[in-house]
Image (cartoon, rainbow, N blue to C red):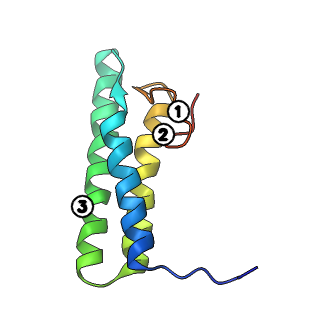
Amino acid sequence: MNDKIIVTIERVEKYISLTEEARKKATPIKLKPENSEKLSSMLRMCDDYFSDARYFMQKGDLVRAFGAINYAHAWIDAAVKIGFMDGQGDDNLFTLP
């Protein structure tokens, strides 16, 4: 087993693609106004980290790009897990409730 995992452009692109797919697939559930505001904040964080990942990738900083895209995915995954969004039963993209 290789103890060292190399962050490559291909690896970052794979996770960008997965996160993009997750962002499109998850749909908001009808929520109380206060929870709608929380979901909006979570999705903003997802989108901001997604944007950061692309920025770092363009700069050649693959480690930060990989970190940022994983944070982006975590925000949308959390929204599905706590019931603010419907993950459409996709347990490959989300940690389902």
Please tell me which residue lies in front, 79 or 27. Answer: 27
**Residue at 45% of width from left, 30% of height from top?**
87
Count of numbered badges drawn on the protein: 3
Q: Position of residue 11 (x, y in %)?
A: 45, 71
What numbered label is drawn on residue 33? none
**Residue at 40% of width from left, 42% of height from top?**
76
In three-dimensional space, the C-alpha distance between marks 2 and 1, rounded to whole angstroms, equals: 5 Å
**Does 21 sit left or right of 90 as displayed?**
left
- Please tell me in which quadrant of the rendered image residue 3 appears: bottom right
What numbered label is drawn on residue 51? 3
Disc 3 packing (10 Å; few <14; some 14–19; many ≥20): some
* Amino acid at pointer 1: Lys
Secondary element at image label 3? helix
User: What residue sits right under mark 1 in the picture?
Assistant: 81
Disc 1 packing (10 Å; few <14; some 14–19; many ≥20): some
Asked whether disc 2 touches disc 1, contact meaning CB atoms under 8 Å apart, the reply is: yes
Secondary element at image label 2? helix
Q: Quadrant of the C terminus?
A: top right
User: What residue sits right under mark 2 in the picture?
Assistant: 78
**Does 51 sit left or right of 34 as displayed?**
left
Q: Position of residue 28 (x, y in %)?
A: 33, 25
* Amino acid at pointer 2: Ala
* Amino acid at pointer 3: Ser
**Residue at 38% of width from left, 51% of height from top?**
19
**Does 77 sit left or right of 44 as displayed?**
right
Please tell me which residue lies in front, 90 or 23. Answer: 90
**Residue at 41% of width from left, 52% of height from top?**
18
Disc with the residue nearer the chain's start (3 vs 2):
3
Q: Where is residue 33 in the image (x, y as percent from the top left)?
A: 28, 18
Disc with the residue nearer the chain's start (1 vs 3):
3
Q: Where is residue 35 in the image (x, y as percent from the top left)?
A: 35, 24
